[in-house]
Image: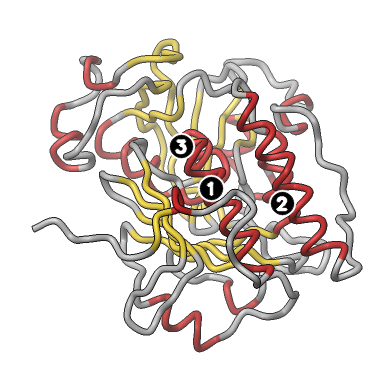
């Protein structure tokens, strides 16, 4: 039986929002952009959630029992992201969080977008609860590779809206300038040779697929430096090292690839719809015992994510590291 989705379709809302509350206005504008940008943009912005590919549905003002998130992003195949936005620092409510957590399971995730400089303590180490601040979100949006002029315009207007409703009204303007580069600055600092280089990407989904099905697939033509190895970071640890077999395929329908077992589609993506993805064939070569633990800290000394999009290290470093600071 198909479950009817609750909430107002974002297609019925103006890009500038029909709400009087500032939080509702910026959230509605963001959801509108994500609806237009589609799965590629959603996966790029919320890559830490590590999402499978498929078409998406976007809704605002969700009612799920005692929980009322500000919005939701769902995929026909296997995930749903509930969104709670806050424009005032230190305003995450424990009771509201407890209600929202009733919605979370292995496929459902909860994303908080706040104006705090670092992740609120109450959100740390919560299962399938993710965090980003508005400044970080703006940086992500600005660095997205634009091939659509309308999307570029909508994002520029959204940035102005966020600056006006959040930073200017709070007298707390962003302290960092967003990079105009589509490639992370850390990529430019990578000098190791191809045979030494390890790509580290984030996400529970990718590691599970690599372990059980022997491949990693992401959005088509996503940029990576050439490398021989790949590892996955999630839950503040790195546990496995994989060797990349052959040359990655930049854009392919993975259902047509002999290296992708048919069991993947029945077990992981039963409603798979053909689309182009970048494909790495992987072979497990080492399990780290003990696991490499994340010890990354922000400027306030709080534990923070080691990987947001991708990082690089050498095979020598990763085989000897005990903590991410050693990579």
Q: Quadrant location of the C terminus?
A: top right
Q: Residue at x 33, y 52 (%)?
A: 79
> In the picture provided, is 85 more to the left or to the right than 290?
right
Q: Compared to 109, does 184 lie above or below?
A: above
Quadrant of the rendered structure where residue 248 is?
top left
Q: Could you tell me which secondary element the residue under label 2 belongs to? A: helix
Disc on the earlier residue, 1 or 2: 1
Q: Could you tell me which secondary element the residue under label 3 belongs to? A: helix
Q: Quadrant location of the N terminus?
A: bottom left
Q: Could you tell me which secondary element the residue under label 1 belongs to? A: helix
Quadrant of the rendered structure where residue 141 is?
top right
Q: Compared to 11, does 118 lie above or below?
A: below
- Residues packed near mark 1 inside 10 Å, few (<14), some (14 to 19) or many (20 plus): many
Q: Compared to 285, does 129 lie above or below?
A: below
Q: Residue at x 59, y 39 (%)?
A: 318
Mark 1 to mark 2: distance in Å? 18 Å
Question: Which label is found at residue 32?
Answer: 1
> In the picture provided, is 288 more to the left or to the right than 142?
left
Q: Please, which residue is most extreme toward the bottom here?
A: 95
The mark lying in front, picked from 1 and 2, is 1
- Residues packed near mark 2 inside 10 Å, few (<14), some (14 to 19) or many (20 plus): some
Q: Of residues 47 and 61, which is closer to you in this image?
A: 61
Are the two marked residues, 3 and 1, in contact with CB atoms closer than 8 angstroms?
A: no
Mark 3 to mark 1: distance in Å? 10 Å
Please provide percent x and percent y for residue 90. Answer: 72, 79
Q: Of residues 115 and 250, which is closer to you in this image?
A: 115
Disc on the earlier residue, 3 or 1: 1
The coloring applied to the image is secondary structure
Disc on the earlier residue, 2 or 3: 3
| Residue hosting label 2 | 136
Mark 2 to mark 3: distance in Å? 20 Å
| Residue hosting label 3 | 38
């Amino acid at each position: 039986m198909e479950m009817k989705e609750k909430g107002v379709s974002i297609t019925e809302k103006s890009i500038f929002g029909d709400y009087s509350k500032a939080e509702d206005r910026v959230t509605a504008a963001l959801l509108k952009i994500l609806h237009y940008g589609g799965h590629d943009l959603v996966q790029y912005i919320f890559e830490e959630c590590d999402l499978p590919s498929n078409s998406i549905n976007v809704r605002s003002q969700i009612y799920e029992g005692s929980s009322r998130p500000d919005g939701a992003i769902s995929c026909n195949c296997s995930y749903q992201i509930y969104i709670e936005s806050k424009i005032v620092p230190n305003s995450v409510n424990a009771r509201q969080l407890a209600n929202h957590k009733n919605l979370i399971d292995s496929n459902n995730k909860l994303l908080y977008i706040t104006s705090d400089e670092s992740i609120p303590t109450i959100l740390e180490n919560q299962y399938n609860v993710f965090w980003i601040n508005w400044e970080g979100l703006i940086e992500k949006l600005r660095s997205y590779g634009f091939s659509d002029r309308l999307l570029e315009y909508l994002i520029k207007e959204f940035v102005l809206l966020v600056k006006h409703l959040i930073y200017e009204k709070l007298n707390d303007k962003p302290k960092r300038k967003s990079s105009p580069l589509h490639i992370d600055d850390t990529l430019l600092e990578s000098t190791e040779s191809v045979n030494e280089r390890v790509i580290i990407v984030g996400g529970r989904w990718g590691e599970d697929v690599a372990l059980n099905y022997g491949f990693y697939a992401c959005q088509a033509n996503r940029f990576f430096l050439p490398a021989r190895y790949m590892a996955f970071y999630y839950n503040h640890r790195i546990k496995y090292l994989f060797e990349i077999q052959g040359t990655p395929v930049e854009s392919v329908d993975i259902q047509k690839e002999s290296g992708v077992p048919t069991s993947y589609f029945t077990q992981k993506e039963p409603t798979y719809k053909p689309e182009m993805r970048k494909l790495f064939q992987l072979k497990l070569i080492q399990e780290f015992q003990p696991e490499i633990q994340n010890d990354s800290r922000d400027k306030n000394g709080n534990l923070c994510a080691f990987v947001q999009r991708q990082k690089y290290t050498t095979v020598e470093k990763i085989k000897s590291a005990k903590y991410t600071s050693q990579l």
